[in-house]
Image: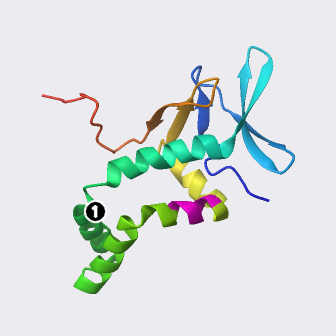
Amino acid sequence: MRQPLFAGLVVDENDQPVEVAYVGDEPCYVVNDRGFRRHIPSEQVDRQVLDIMRQQIEGHEDLLSEQTAKMLGQEDPFSRAMIYTQLRNLDKQFEQLLQTGIPEEGRAYLGMMGFRIVINLHGEVVRVEQPGIASDEGDDEG
Protein backbone atom coordinates (compact mmCIF):
# COMPACT_ATOMS: atom_id res chain seq x y z
CA MET A 1 0.00 0.00 0.00
CA ARG A 2 1.30 3.44 -0.94
CA GLN A 3 2.43 5.69 1.91
CA PRO A 4 2.25 9.48 2.13
CA LEU A 5 5.67 10.71 1.04
CA PHE A 6 6.11 13.16 3.91
CA ALA A 7 4.29 11.37 6.75
CA GLY A 8 5.35 12.81 10.10
CA LEU A 9 6.76 15.97 8.51
CA VAL A 10 3.50 17.83 7.88
CA VAL A 11 1.89 20.30 10.28
CA ASP A 12 -1.10 22.61 9.99
CA GLU A 13 -1.00 26.40 10.23
CA ASN A 14 -1.41 26.13 14.02
CA ASP A 15 1.78 24.02 14.20
CA GLN A 16 -0.23 20.89 15.01
CA PRO A 17 1.01 17.59 13.54
CA VAL A 18 -1.09 16.30 10.68
CA GLU A 19 -2.16 12.67 10.99
CA VAL A 20 -2.13 10.05 8.25
CA ALA A 21 -5.18 7.95 7.43
CA TYR A 22 -6.51 5.96 4.48
CA VAL A 23 -9.74 6.40 2.59
CA GLY A 24 -9.95 3.00 0.97
CA ASP A 25 -6.41 2.50 -0.27
CA GLU A 26 -5.74 6.22 -0.80
CA PRO A 27 -3.34 7.73 1.75
CA CYS A 28 -4.45 11.07 3.18
CA TYR A 29 -3.12 13.75 5.47
CA VAL A 30 -5.73 14.54 8.11
CA VAL A 31 -6.03 18.15 9.27
CA ASN A 32 -8.03 18.85 12.43
CA ASP A 33 -10.37 21.74 11.61
CA ARG A 34 -11.81 22.50 15.07
CA GLY A 35 -12.91 18.90 15.51
CA PHE A 36 -13.74 18.20 11.86
CA ARG A 37 -11.13 15.88 10.37
CA ARG A 38 -10.37 16.99 6.81
CA HIS A 39 -8.89 14.18 4.72
CA ILE A 40 -6.59 15.53 2.02
CA PRO A 41 -5.18 13.06 -0.52
CA SER A 42 -1.47 12.90 0.28
CA GLU A 43 -0.47 12.96 -3.38
CA GLN A 44 -2.00 16.45 -3.68
CA VAL A 45 0.30 17.77 -0.94
CA ASP A 46 3.32 15.64 -1.90
CA ARG A 47 3.28 16.89 -5.50
CA GLN A 48 3.17 20.53 -4.32
CA VAL A 49 6.25 19.93 -2.17
CA LEU A 50 8.09 18.16 -4.98
CA ASP A 51 7.26 21.07 -7.29
CA ILE A 52 8.75 23.52 -4.78
CA MET A 53 11.88 21.38 -4.62
CA ARG A 54 12.06 21.23 -8.43
CA GLN A 55 11.91 25.04 -8.60
CA GLN A 56 14.81 25.27 -6.14
CA ILE A 57 16.92 22.86 -8.21
CA GLU A 58 16.17 24.15 -11.73
CA GLY A 59 18.96 26.29 -13.05
CA HIS A 60 21.40 25.05 -10.40
CA GLU A 61 22.04 21.54 -11.76
CA ASP A 62 25.73 22.22 -12.51
CA LEU A 63 26.52 23.46 -9.02
CA LEU A 64 24.40 20.77 -7.33
CA SER A 65 25.98 17.94 -9.34
CA GLU A 66 29.45 19.26 -8.53
CA GLN A 67 28.71 19.59 -4.80
CA THR A 68 26.97 16.20 -4.66
CA ALA A 69 29.93 14.52 -6.36
CA LYS A 70 32.27 16.12 -3.81
CA MET A 71 30.10 14.94 -0.92
CA LEU A 72 30.14 11.42 -2.34
CA GLY A 73 33.88 11.52 -2.99
CA GLN A 74 33.17 10.89 -6.69
CA GLU A 75 34.52 14.03 -8.32
CA ASP A 76 35.36 12.45 -11.67
CA PRO A 77 33.59 13.87 -14.76
CA PHE A 78 31.62 10.65 -15.34
CA SER A 79 30.06 10.70 -11.86
CA ARG A 80 29.26 14.41 -12.13
CA ALA A 81 27.60 13.80 -15.51
CA MET A 82 25.48 10.99 -14.05
CA ILE A 83 24.35 13.18 -11.15
CA TYR A 84 23.65 16.06 -13.53
CA THR A 85 21.51 13.77 -15.71
CA GLN A 86 19.52 12.65 -12.68
CA LEU A 87 18.90 16.27 -11.70
CA ARG A 88 17.76 17.09 -15.24
CA ASN A 89 15.26 14.21 -15.11
CA LEU A 90 13.55 15.18 -11.86
CA ASP A 91 10.07 14.32 -13.14
CA LYS A 92 11.06 10.66 -13.50
CA GLN A 93 12.84 10.70 -10.14
CA PHE A 94 9.84 12.25 -8.39
CA GLU A 95 7.36 9.82 -9.98
CA GLN A 96 9.46 6.92 -8.77
CA LEU A 97 9.71 8.50 -5.32
CA LEU A 98 5.90 8.83 -5.15
CA GLN A 99 5.63 5.10 -5.87
CA THR A 100 8.38 3.85 -3.56
CA GLY A 101 8.18 6.48 -0.82
CA ILE A 102 10.85 7.80 1.50
CA PRO A 103 12.05 5.18 4.00
CA GLU A 104 11.04 5.86 7.59
CA GLU A 105 14.67 6.48 8.58
CA GLY A 106 14.95 9.08 5.80
CA ARG A 107 11.85 10.89 7.03
CA ALA A 108 13.16 10.73 10.61
CA TYR A 109 16.46 12.27 9.46
CA LEU A 110 14.62 15.04 7.59
CA GLY A 111 12.60 15.75 10.73
CA MET A 112 15.74 15.91 12.89
CA MET A 113 17.23 18.39 10.42
CA GLY A 114 14.17 20.62 10.89
CA PHE A 115 12.44 19.87 7.57
CA ARG A 116 8.70 20.57 7.84
CA ILE A 117 5.79 21.20 5.56
CA VAL A 118 3.03 23.59 6.65
CA ILE A 119 -0.35 23.14 4.98
CA ASN A 120 -3.68 24.92 5.35
CA LEU A 121 -7.11 23.33 5.82
CA HIS A 122 -7.47 22.80 2.07
CA GLY A 123 -4.17 20.97 1.66
CA GLU A 124 -2.37 23.88 0.06
CA VAL A 125 1.29 24.10 1.02
CA VAL A 126 1.80 27.35 2.92
CA ARG A 127 5.56 26.85 3.22
CA VAL A 128 8.30 24.26 3.31
CA GLU A 129 10.81 24.80 6.09
CA GLN A 130 14.26 23.62 5.11
CA PRO A 131 16.86 24.85 7.60
CA GLY A 132 20.17 25.51 5.89
CA ILE A 133 18.55 26.22 2.51
CA ALA A 134 18.71 29.82 1.35
CA SER A 135 15.37 31.43 0.59
CA ASP A 136 14.58 33.65 -2.38
CA GLU A 137 11.76 35.39 -0.51
CA GLY A 138 13.60 38.59 0.38
CA ASP A 139 15.12 37.32 3.61
CA ASP A 140 18.38 39.07 2.71
CA GLU A 141 20.68 39.72 5.63
CA GLY A 142 23.01 42.66 5.67
* Residue 55, percent from left and from top: 36, 47
Q: Is residue 109 one of those drawn in magenta?
A: no
Residue situated furthest top in the rendering: 34
* Residue 59, percent from left and from top: 25, 55
Secondary structure mostly seen in the magenta stretch: helix
Q: Is residue 96 one of those drawn in magenta?
A: yes
Residue 140 to residue 88: above or below: above
The answer to whether residue 112 of the structure is visible from this angle is no
* Residue 132, percent from left and from top: 34, 44
* Residue position marked by numbered label 1 in the rendering: 61
Left or right for 137, reference 124: left
Q: Residue 31 is drawn in which quadrant?
A: top right
Residue situated furthest right in the rendering: 24
Residue drawn at x 33%, y 54% is 57
Residue drawn at x 40%, y 52% is 54
Q: How many residues crowd mark 1 within 10 Å: few (<14), some (14–19), many (20+)? A: some
Residue 10 to residue 13: above or below: below
Secondary structure found at label 1: helix
Residue 5 to residue 70: above or below: above
- Numbered circles on residues, count: 1
Residue drawn at x 67%, y 43% is 42
Q: If the image is split into quadrants, where does the N terminus sit?
A: bottom right
The kind of residue tagged 1 is Glu
Residue drawn at x 27%, y 72% is 70
Which of these two is toward me, 116 or 81?
Answer: 81
Q: If the image is split into quadrants, where does the C terminus sit?
A: top left
The answer to whether residue 129 of the structure is visible from this angle is yes
The magenta segment: 94-98
Residue 85 to residue 113: above or below: below
* Residue 100, percent from left and from top: 65, 65
Q: Residue 13 is drawn in which quadrant?
A: top right
